[in-house]
C-alpha cells in the first residue's frame, strides 16, 4: 500500500468524524458520509467523495457547505494527521451507492419478468 493510500484512509476517517460531529452548517444533510479520499502521489491534492441521500438540491447544498468549511476541515485534519503540508481538498458527490441500488432494481425487475414469462 502506497503512502498516499494510507494518508487517504486516515483522512477519510478524520473528515467523516469532522462532518458528523463538528460541522454545524444547516445546509449539511444528516445523511452524508465520506466514502473515499483519493490523495495524489505528491500529497498536494485530495478528492473527497461524499455520498448524500437526497435530491439534487440537497447534494448541491451539501457541496456548498463542505466547500465553505474546507479551510476548517483542512486545518483540523492537519492537526490530527501530522503531515508537512496538508493536501488541498476537493469535494465531489459520490453517486455509486445510488447507481448500485438502481442496477439491483433493474436486475430484480429483469429476473421477475423472466420468471413471469416462464410460468
Image (cartoon, rainbow, N blue to C red):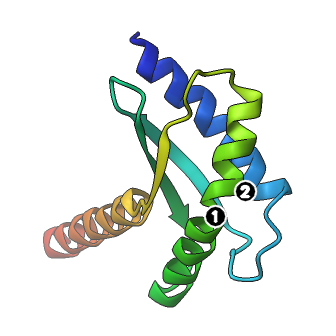
In the image: residue 95, left or right of residue 64:
left
Which residue is at a point 34% across and 69% down the rendered structure image? 102
Q: Is residue 4 above or below residue 11?
A: above
Q: Which mark is residue 16?
A: none
Label 1 Cα crowd, 10 Å radius (few <14 / some 14-19 / many 20+): some
Towards the viewer: 109 or 35:
35
Q: Residue furthest front?
A: 84
Percent of width and height locating residue 16: 68, 47
Towards the viewer: 46 or 10:
46
Which residue is at a point 52% across and 58% down the rendered structure image? 50
Q: Is residue 65 above or below residue 79?
A: below
The mark closer to the camera, 1 or 2, is 2
Q: Quadrant of the C terminus?
A: bottom left
Gap between marks 1 and 2, in whole Å? 8 Å
Which residue is at a point 23% across and 67% down the rendered structure image? 115
Percent of width and height locating residue 116: 22, 75
Percent of width and height locating residue 37: 48, 40
Say which residue label 1 marks.
32
On the image, which quarter does residue 82 sit in?
top right
Which residue is at a point 59% across and 38% down the rendered structure image? 12
In the image: residue 5, left or right of residue 116:
right
Towards the viewer: 77 or 110:
77
The secondary structure type at the circle numbered 2 is helix
Towards the viewer: 7 or 70:
70
Q: Which mark is residue 19?
A: 2
The secondary structure type at the circle numbered 1 is strand
Q: Are marks 1 and 2 in contact (CB under 8 Å)?
A: yes
Amino acid at each position: 500500500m502506497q503512502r498516499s493510500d494510507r494518508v487517504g484512509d486516515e483522512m477519510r476517517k478524520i473528515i467523516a468524524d469532522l462532518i458528523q460531529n463538528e460541522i454545524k452548517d444547516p445546509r449539511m444533510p444528516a445523511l452524508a458520509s465520506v466514502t473515499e479520499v483519493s490523495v495524489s502521489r505528491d500529497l498536494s491534492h485530495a478528492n473527497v467523495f461524499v455520498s448524500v441521500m437526497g435530491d439534487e438540491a440537497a447534494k448541491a447544498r451539501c457541496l456548498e457547505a463542505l466547500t465553505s468549511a474546507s479551510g476548517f476541515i483542512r486545518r483540523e485534519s492537519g492537526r490530527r494527521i501530522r503531515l508537512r503540508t496538508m493536501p488541498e481538498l476537493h469535494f465531489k458527490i459520490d453517486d455509486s451507492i445510488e447507481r448500485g441500488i438502481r442496477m439491483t432494481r433493474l436486475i430484480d425487475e429483469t429476473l421477475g419478468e423472466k420468471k413471469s414469462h416462464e410460468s
